[in-house]
Image (cartoon, helix red, strand yellow):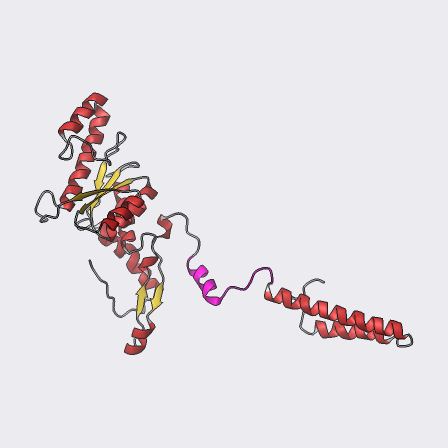
Amino acid sequence: FIPLRTQAPGVIPLLALLLLGCGSRRMASPVYSAGGVAAAVAVLCAAILSYVASSSGSRCPPKPSWWRRFLGKRPQRRGLVDAVGNTPLIRINSLSEATGCEILGKAEFLNPGGSVKDRVAVKIIEEALESGHIVDGGIVTEGSAGSTAISLATLAPAYGCKCHVVIPDDVAVEKSQILEALGATVERVRPVSITHKHHFVNVARRRATEANERAKRQRNSTESEAREFLHANGHDSEEPHPSFSSDCRGGFFADQFENLANFRAHYKCTGPEIWEQTGGNLHAFVAAAG
């Protein structure tokens, strides 16, 4: 039977009556009468089963309403970078009910790198590429012991760049393992004052400068001269750092604390995104720093 999904509900009772009527015209013959009734019952049962199966979508179980809403709000993303941002607002029921206000939380943990710093990493790298401060194959350096390092390590490869992170050596070893698993190179240094040249942020800045110098020297010199330069300007040793490969194409210091791309990521993206999600019905905003 053709599924009766598009038919009116009254079709099935009508069909049953017609079939039973056909059987009743043969009451003169008990065999035919019984056969007609049996056929009518069989047809009716088949029709009901067909209708139920077609209505419930037996080939694919119906998805719950929350699943349809999730798919509607978060369509398929085209690549890792496209997955950054557009995170949902989640109503915090306990606080909302306790205060009588609608309190919403921005689910930034749904970014691919697991934090809001993914937005900053995208903006920093894109502005550096647009301005020519870094090119495809270049090295993004940063001194960070937090989420920014993870975000840069996650997203730099999506732009064809490498990532070199400098961190204090008293940071948990798991942090280095995560960064290395993401493809970044990690340099651990002793904790010192920010004014010291060996502070991890200052070392990261210096590594970007060294990468640029090496790339420039490689473009304008022979391979022999490049090796001599590397020996004279190495990283406090005669051995080159792993980030400085033979095909080094320059470096760029992300400088999250001073780079205004950090601010612009939220001014141009996060802020308007929240405003749109709330329909402009927003009375207070709270964010943690650190």
The answer to whether one can see residue 122 in this image is yes
Which range of residues does the magenta coloring cover? Answer: 58-74
Quadrant of the rendering where the C terminus is positioned: bottom left
Residue at 45% across / 64% down in the picture? 69
Q: Is 85 located above or below residue 233 in the figure?
A: below
61 within the magenta span: yes
Q: Is 241 located above or below residue 82 in the figure?
A: above
Residue at 27% across / 53% down in the picture? 117
Residue 41, how many percent across, how many down?
Answer: 76, 72
Residue lying farthest to the front in this orientation: 173
Residue 242, how many percent across, how many down?
Answer: 24, 35
The foreground one among 166 and 239 is 239
Q: Is residue 23 left or right of residue 273?
A: right
Q: Is residue 111 left or right of residue 190?
A: right
Quadrant of the rendering where the N terminus is positioned: bottom right
- The quarter of the picture where residue 37 lies is bottom right
